[in-house]
Image: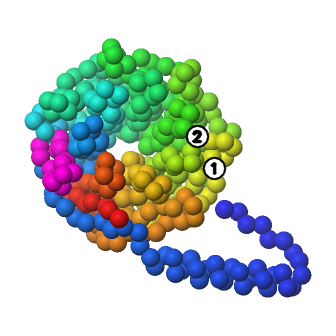
């Protein structure tokens, strides 16, 4: 938020100063409060990060793929049962190991899995469908590009928009395509306005998609954003940009139609992590900075969920969770902590209003690199 200071009488300055001091005191008191709590529950079958988590039509959660550490990827999946707070291995395995892939719940209840790393050579080009009735995976048509770090978003038409990512681990893609669940085919459409890797894709109230930030061409993080119109299959660059460059961040639609964009990093990656957040208003097309989070957070895509009361639970990238209140534009810590930052974890809103936090990895070490955890937690009020 930008503050304008006007010169005036000494009395006015005094009043403003007193008001600011009072606001600081109120803010300090409010920050000492907590909202809800996180409780550790059962462990999953594998130590996973960069996996996917999808709430199924039957209320269970599909936890698929991911990695234990660099080069150790999985083709297995766990099923979380919210009735017992336990995990069980799915009957079937994916046709390919996948880390940094996407998972999208289709209108018919199946789940589309696309891309991700299967080995250390290059991201995968394949896709497959998970059927919750049989707990099995079945291959479908290949994408037009190898992708990891991309987005896959369900459109109002029932099709899925696939954007950006990387085909080699280094070069960002501007190419986009659409998956048709009726035919199982991927069709290329026009390119995005910018190449993007580690960006966000958020469905707006009108069905259009906001694509924000990411890692672009020339090894630069982006502050730009664009809108995808599913009725025309076209991308248009927004006139206004985010307040800062962001990638490996997250974004979520609020109940009032605005979008909360938070965390991520600048070009320095690990050394450039953010505490900051901002709000996108689709009515004005503008981004406005909001209150800071309690922790720096990045590698957090898909780790915020909209609670039933309109607040946002944030469970990734930091050593503890917190909740954003859109009425006050402020963040409040939850009770409890993870004991590690949980990079590339997953957060899923359950049907009963609780949130499930699974896996992720800490800061790692020079010798071992990042090592994932098999721990999980439940957030509840």
Task: Identify the magenta region.
Answer: 77-89
Residues at circles 1 and 2 in contact by the CB criterion of under 8 Å:
yes
Quadrant location, the C terminus = bottom left
Look at the image and say whether residue 83 sits in the magenta stretch: yes
Look at the image and say whether residue 190 sits in the magenta stretch: no
**Residue at figure coordinates x 29%, y 56% from the top left:** 357
**Residue at figure coordinates x 25%, y 60% from the top left:** 377
Quadrant location, the N terminus = bottom right
The label shown at residue 225 is 2
Give left or right: position of 282 versus 298: right
**Residue at figure coordinates x 34%, y 34% from the top left:** 104
Please say if 85 is above or below 236. below
Few, some or many C-alpha atoms within 10 Å of disc 1 (few <14, some 14-19, many ≥20)? many
Answer with the quarter of the image where residue 181 lies.
top left
Front disc: 1 or 2:
1
Q: Is residue 69 in view?
A: no
Q: CA distance from mark 1 to mark 2?
A: 10 Å
Q: Which residue is mark 1?
A: 287
Residue 37 horizontal/vertical position (percent): 33, 68
């Amino acid at each position: 938020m930008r503050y304008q200071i006007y010169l005036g009488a000494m009395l006015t300055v005094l009043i403003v100063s007193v008001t600011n001091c009072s606001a600081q005191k109120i803010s300090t008191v409010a920050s000492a409060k907590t909202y809800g709590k996180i409780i550790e529950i059962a462990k999953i079958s594998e130590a996973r990060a960069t996996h996917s988590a999808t709430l199924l039509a039957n209320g269970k959660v599909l936890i698929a793929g991911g990695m234990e550490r660099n080069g150790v990827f999985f083709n297995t999946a766990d099923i979380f049962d919210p009735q017992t707070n336990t995990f069980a291995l799915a009957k079937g395995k994916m046709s390919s190991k996948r880390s940094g892939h996407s998972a999208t719940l289709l209108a018919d209840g199946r789940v589309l899995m696309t891309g991700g790393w299967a080995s250390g050579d290059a991201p995968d080009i394949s896709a497959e469908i998970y059927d919750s009735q049989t707990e099995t995976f079945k291959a479908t048509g290949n994408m037009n590009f190898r992708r990891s770090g991309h987005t896959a978003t369900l459109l109002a038409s029932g099709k899925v928009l696939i954007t950006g990512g990387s085909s080699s681990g280094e070069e960002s893609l501007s190419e986009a395509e659409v998956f048709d669940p009726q035919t199982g085919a991927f069709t290329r459409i026009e390119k995005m306005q910018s190449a993007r890797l580690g960006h966000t894709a958020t469905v707006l109230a009108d069905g259009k998609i906001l694509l924000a930030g990411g890692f672009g061409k020339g090894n630069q993080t982006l502050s730009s954003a664009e809108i995808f119109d599913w009725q025309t299959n076209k991308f248009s660059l927004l006139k206004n940009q985010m307040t800062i460059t962001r990638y490996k961040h997250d974004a979520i639609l609020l109940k009032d139609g605005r979008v909360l964009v938070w965390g991520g990093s600048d070009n320095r990656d690990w050394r450039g992590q953010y505490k900051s957040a901002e709000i996108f208003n689709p009515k004005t097309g503008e981004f406005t900075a909001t209150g800071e989070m309690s922790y720096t957070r990045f590698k957090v895509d898909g780790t915020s969920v909209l609670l039933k009361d309109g607040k946002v639970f944030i469970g990734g990238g930091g050593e503890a969770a917190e909740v954003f209140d859109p009425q006050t534009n402020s963040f409040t810590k939850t009770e409890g902590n993870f004991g590690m930052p949980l990079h590339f974890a997953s957060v899923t809103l359950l049907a009963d209003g609780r949130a499930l936090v699974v896996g992720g990895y800490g800061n790692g070490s020079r010798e071992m690199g990042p090592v994932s955890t098999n721990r999980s937690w439940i957030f509840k009020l």
